[in-house]
Image (cartoon, grey):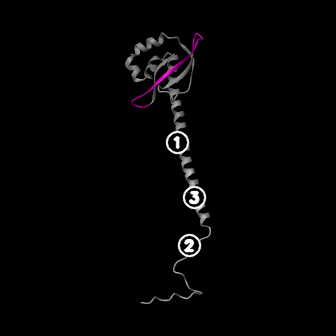
Amino acid sequence: MTEAPAPPPGPGVLTPFPAPPTEGRRVRIGWGLGIGAAVLVLVCGGGLAAVTGLVVVAGRALNEQAQVVVSDYLGDVRAKRYAEAYDALCDRTKAQLTEAEYTTEQAGRQPIREFRVGSLDLASVDLAVPVDVTYTDGRAARLQAYLGQSDETGEFQVCSVEE
């Protein structure tokens, strides 16, 4: 069997497939790798920024909730609203102390004139908030308000306030 002769070159003759371009191949590869690297950096950097932002916002929210809980509790103690202050205590403390015992204990303490609640230390094992207190006799003290979380709601509750 003989093979058919190749078509003669000339105008109007089409090659069976186009030849790949040979010029600029390295430039296109460089651009492709550069764009791919830039997208990777943006995605990873954006994810890292999002996680960092989430941690910061969550920390601020927890700190704000802790400060509100401690401020409300100490406000009730200062105003001698012992029943409301007792209700704000964590379940563990309420199990160890009746409301009557709590009221007697609080009534025997030096009354608070003013207080300033500090920031929650998220790095510590026990959830503690520092509180600077000034008593009615002029004495100042730094207290620690120890917090727990409600089993039902997950919100902070005051467990104890100690010097």
Judging depth in this view, the residue of 93 and 49 nearest the camera is 49
The percent position of residue 35, horizontal first and vertical second, equals: 58, 57
Label 2 to label 1: alpha-carbon separation: 45 Å
- Taking 59 as reference, is 107 above or below it? above
Q: Depth check: 33 or 95 in front?
A: 33
Residue 108: image x %, image y %?
48, 9
Question: Which residues lie in the magenta part?
Answer: 134-154
Residue marked by disc 2:
20
- The kind of residue tagged 2 is Pro
The residue to which callout 1 is attached is 51
Frontmost residue, 142 versus 38: 38
Q: Residue at x 47, y 11 (%)?
A: 107
Q: Residues within 10 Å of mark 2 (few under 14, many from 20)?
A: few
Residue 11: quarter of image: bottom right
* Residue designated by label 3: 33
Mark 1–mark 3 contact, CB under 8 Å? no
**Mark number, residue 142:** none
The image position of residue 143, as x and y in percent, is 53, 18
Category of crowding for the residue at label 1, using alpha-carbon neighbours closer than 10 angstroms: few (below 14), some (14–19), many (at least 20)? few
Query: Which dot, 2 or 1, sits closer to the camera?
Result: 2
Q: CA distance from mark 1 to mark 3?
A: 27 Å
Q: Amino acid at mark 3?
A: Leu
Mark 2 or mark 1: which comes first in sequence?
2
Q: Secondary structure at mark 2?
A: loop
Q: Residue at x 57, y 60 (%)?
A: 32
User: Toward the viewer: 13 or 110?
Assistant: 13
Residue 80 belongs to magenta span: no
| C-alpha gap between disc 3 and disc 2 | 20 Å
Question: Disc 3 vs disc 2: Cβ atoms closer than 8 Å?
Answer: no
| Mark earlier in primary sequence (1, 3) | 3
